[in-house]
Structures are given as C-alpha cells and as structure tokens.
Amino acid sequence: MSKTEDPHGGPWYMHFWPWFIVTLLGCTVVAGILTVILAFRGADPLVVDDYYSSGKAINQTLDADREAGLREARAAVELGDGVTVELEILGELPEGLQLELSHVTRAELDRSFELVRSAAGRYTASEVVPEGRFYATLRPAGAGSSWRLRRQVTLPAEASFAMEPSG
C-alpha cells in the first residue's frame, strides 16, 4: 500500500496564511479601539451649542467692526512680560480696554486681559501671555463696547503687531 502525502504539509498553525489573516484582523481591532479612544478623548469645542443665537448676533459684531472703521481706530500691541497697547482713535479714549486671545483650536488656552490706561493712548496689563496661534480681539472695557479690532496672530513669533479695522 502506498502512503499518501498531505498536500498542505502539516497542521494549520504551521502555515503562513492563517497567521497572516489573524494578524490583519488583530490590527483592525486595535485600530478600531484606538479610533474610539481618540474620538471620545478629543471632543470638539469649536462647535457652538446655540448656533441660532450666534447667527442672529453676527450683525452686532459687524456693526462693531464698522464703528472701528468710522472712528479710524488703530492699535499697536506688544506682548511679552506683559501686555502694552498704544491706541489711536477719533473721539474720546476709553478708560480701559479688553484684549481677548482666543486659541484657534483649544478653548482651554483662551485668555482675556483687562488693560488700564496708564498714559494718553497707552494701556497696560502685567499678565503672562500664552504661546500659540490666536484670534486677537481688542475692544473697550465695559458692557457698552461699540467698536472692536480683530486680527489673527501667532505668539511668540508676532510679539509686536498692529491692529486695524477689518470692516
């Protein structure tokens, strides 16, 4: 009697293809778990919950940009150990200014500075300025702020910058 040979050459775990398929499936499971972890850990804070009210308020912000243009508002900002702003504007100078630095992607890095007038047209605050890419908004302090200046800035590369009306 002749001996028939196994065409596959041994048990399944001795072959390449079963291990290749198991490895691919294992990598897929690990990648799926990592994707779920990243999705839940990195929630997107950029989406506004009350988008309807934000949309209705856009006209007020555009009016503030136009008002800055009518007043010919200009500011030179220096950020370093503290914040210094030199403001030129038609009309009466405000008693204080508010400078908001809103990080482009991370809300926990947002900062707001209350600047007090130290001389004619010069405002200062002694606070530490964070590093990163920000939207800078300058407006008079107080509830009745009628104008604003805006600009995108990268810190510390642009430690000194000018702000002009955008509208």
Image: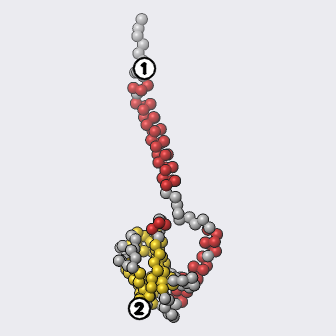
Asked if 68 appears above or below 19 in the picture, the reply is: below
Q: Amino acid at mark 1?
A: Pro
User: Is there CB contact under 8 Å for labels 2 and 1?
Assistant: no
Q: Amino acid at mark 2?
A: Ala
Could you say where residue 145 lies in the image, as x and y percent from the top left? 55, 84
Residue sitting at x 45%, y 85%: 116
Asked if 28 appears above or below 111 in the picture, the reply is: above
Q: Residue 162, located in which quarter of the rendered image?
A: bottom left
| 10 Å crowding of disc 1: few (<14), some (14-19), many (20+) | few
- Residue topped by disc 1: 7
Residue sitting at x 64%, y 69%: 52
- Color encoding of the figure: secondary structure
22 relative position to 67: left or right: left
So how many labels did they put on this image? 2
Asked if 156 appears above or below 75 in the picture, the reply is: above
Could you say where residue 115 lies in the image, as x and y percent from the top left? 45, 82
Could you say where residue 90 lies in the image, as x and y percent from the top left? 50, 93
Residue sitting at x 57%, y 82%: 143
Asked if 145 appears above or below 9 in the picture, the reply is: below
- Residue topped by disc 2: 119
Residue sitting at x 42%, y 92%: 120
159 relative position to 93: left or right: left
Q: Toward the viewer: 23 or 3?
A: 23
Quadrant holding the N terminus: top left
